[in-house]
Image (cartoon, helix red, strand yellow):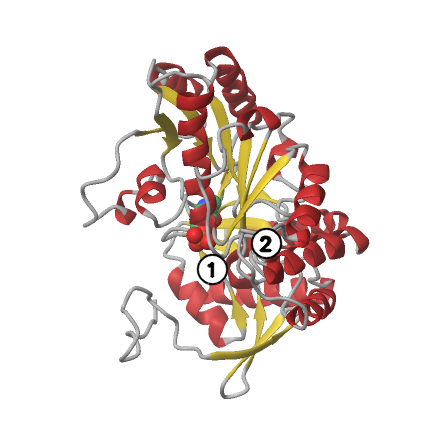
Amino acid sequence: MSTTTAPLHLMNNYARWPIHLVKGKGNRVWDEAGKEYLDFISGIAVTSLGHVPTKVAGKLHEQLDMLWHCSNLFHVPGQEKLAAKLSELSGLSRTLFCNSGAEANEGLIKLARRYAQKVKGTDRYEIITFGQSFHGRTLATLTATGQEKVKDGFLPLPEGFVTIPYNDLAAVHEAVNEKTCAIMLELVQGEGGVHPAYEKFVKGLRQICDEHGLLLLIDEVQTGIGRTGTWFAFQQYGILPDAISLAKGLGSGFPIGAVLATEEAAQAFAPGTHGTTFGGNPLAMAAGLATLETIEEDAMLERVNELHQLLVSSLQQIKAAFPDKVVEIRGKGLLLGMELSIPAAPVLDYAREKGLLLLLAGPQVIRMLPSFITTENEVAQAAAVLKEAIAQA
Ligand SMILES: *Cc1c(COP(=O)(O)O)cnc(C)c1O
């Protein structure tokens, strides 16, 4: 991939593309030189309503003139409103706000351990996670992550995690023991290659958790807030998890994270057991509320499902045109992957040159995360560029 080394005063922890973005509106972003791009990345599943969505921007401007920060020493009205809305949409009655996906997953991990130890009075602590998963970059969440590359150089890792194959119920039965307190997974593995969980697998996990008194924790950081065509991906599996994490799409680009739990699981936290200075900040709450209201008022979930059909059928046509280069199209809603039999990076480079931004999910998988306001014309434009890029590769 054509990437540049870090600017002099920034740490060298990202392989960045040679593009300096300065402006965004809707599904378009512009670089310093004024070149326009069609954005099918959405800041990695973050700007689901497009860039600078009008209603969210309006609510943020209002809040900017009211109160920026006060800390959780006080009641924050926006937190109560957003939590009530999330509860109505998810069926999970209690929310804890934080600032990022990794922090939300840390919250899930702490909730599961403390529930086992303080609510249930057991000495259980082990959490089962899955191969190719991605749960974040903090020490606990990178340990939970089922990809060795994120752990390299960070030993020793915290104890209490076991990773087993995804979509394999027999492996779960084998892994559960007297130390297990929870099972944690994504329902579509985003970073790990756009792999959806099978319905039988997820229903089986719910059953195993019920039988053994374990918490079922769903990482909805990427799949949540409409990305897969329902408010939360778990709603397509006919189960209710004990707790979920949210972040990416919740604030339309304003940093926010959340842990949602059932009344029962939420007993894990009492005053003084967990917290964050910035979590639940009034600006983030305004962005979150306006995001949910926009999705609801503009009937965007229906739109995600329409766009899914349209985009998948365009991608299937590309697959039919290049059967030796395109292996599979998979994913849910607007979290889609196209697996190639060839390296995907040169395809991305070509598309970017032609003004289309696409993402990787592993060396041979192209990931597409267009916004919910993508038009039919934009789908056609993206498909045309992608087809040309694959033809060249
Ligand atoms: C992006 C992501 C995370 C990490 O979120 P950050 O905000 O980068 O910490 C965790 N889990 C999943 C499934 C993600 O896609």
Residue at 67 percent of width and 44 percent of height: 229
Image side of residue 131 versus residue 285, left or right: left
Q: Is residue 311 visible?
A: yes
Helix, strand or loop at label 1? It is: strand
Q: Which residue is at the front of the view, 87 or 162? A: 87
Q: Can residue 326 be seen in this view?
A: no
**Image quarter hosting the N terminus:** bottom left
* Residue underneath mark 2: 249
* Residue underneath mark 1: 359
Residue 383 spot, x, y in % from top left: 60, 62
Residue at 35 percent of width and 20 percent of height: 124
Q: Which residue is at the front of the view, 218 or 355? A: 218
> Which image quadrant for residue 387?
bottom right
Extreme-front residue of the structure: 73
The amino acid pointed to by label 1 is: Leu
Image side of residue 38 versus residue 137, left or right: right
Disc 2 or 1, which lies upstream in sequence?
Answer: 2
Image side of residue 325 versus residue 232, left or right: left
